[in-house]
Image (cartoon, rainbow, N blue to C red):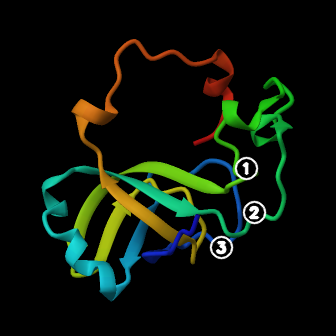
Amino acid sequence: MQLKSIGYIKSPVKQAKFGGWQNLITEIVIDSDYSDGLEGIEEYSHLIVLYWLDKVDKVKLKMRPQGKKDVPEVGIFACRCPWRPNPIGMTTVKLIERNGNILKVKGLDVLDGTPLIDIKPFTPPYDAVEGMKYPDWVNKLEY
């Protein structure tokens, strides 16, 4: 299996942190080879961004999310922690504007220079769910 980057993220955030991402404005820069693939993206308010967590240097199969002592230890597939066997990240963001091959978005929780894998439009028939359930400890995390 092979993945290839289709661009990168320009973010003011250079060091990993917890929280403070919801109002952060970043730019997604699409390589010129793929800029035609952005045609029509302005018609969507939100996008799903997939990226490669290239700064992750180890795998942890169990951990306490964000290192919080009041959160239970869980498996990597039961949380959104980055230390995964395949460090693929995913965030749903608000699209602010498109300027050529650059998308300005709000709420993208990645570091500057993060490689972009894919972008998908958030489409409610596919992406919205009813009756969703999640553990109470998720509300203790910083976003």
Mark 2 or mark 3, which has the lower sequence index?
Answer: 3
What is the quadrant of the N terminus in the image? bottom right
The image position of residue 69, as x and y in percent, is: 86, 29
Q: Residue at x 84, y 37 (%)?
A: 63
- Between 67 and 126, the one lying in front of the other is 126
- In the picture, measured across the screen, residue 94 lies left or right of residue 80, that is left
* 3D distance between C-alphas at marks 2 and 3: 14 Å
Instruction: Name the residue at the front extreme.
Output: 1
Disc 1 is placed on an element classified as loop
Identify the disc placed on residue 56: 2
Between disc 2 and disc 1, the foreground one is 1
State how many labels appear.
3
Which circle's residue, 1 or 3, is located before the other in the chain?
3
* Above or below 99: residue 121: above
Is label 2 in contact with label 3 (beta carbons under 8 Å)? no
Q: Nearer the viewer, residue 111 or 7?
A: 7
**Residue at the outermost top position:** 131
Label 3 sits on residue: 14
| Mark 1 → mark 3, Cα distance in angstroms | 21 Å
* Residue 24, position as x, y percentages in the image: 46, 59
Viewer can see residue 59: yes
Task: Count residues near mark 1 (Cα–Cα under 10 Å), then give few for <14, some for 14-19, many for 20+.
Answer: some
Q: Secondary structure at mark 3?
A: loop
Q: Residues within 10 Å of mark 3 (few under 14, many from 20)?
A: few
Quarter of the image where the C terminus is located: top right
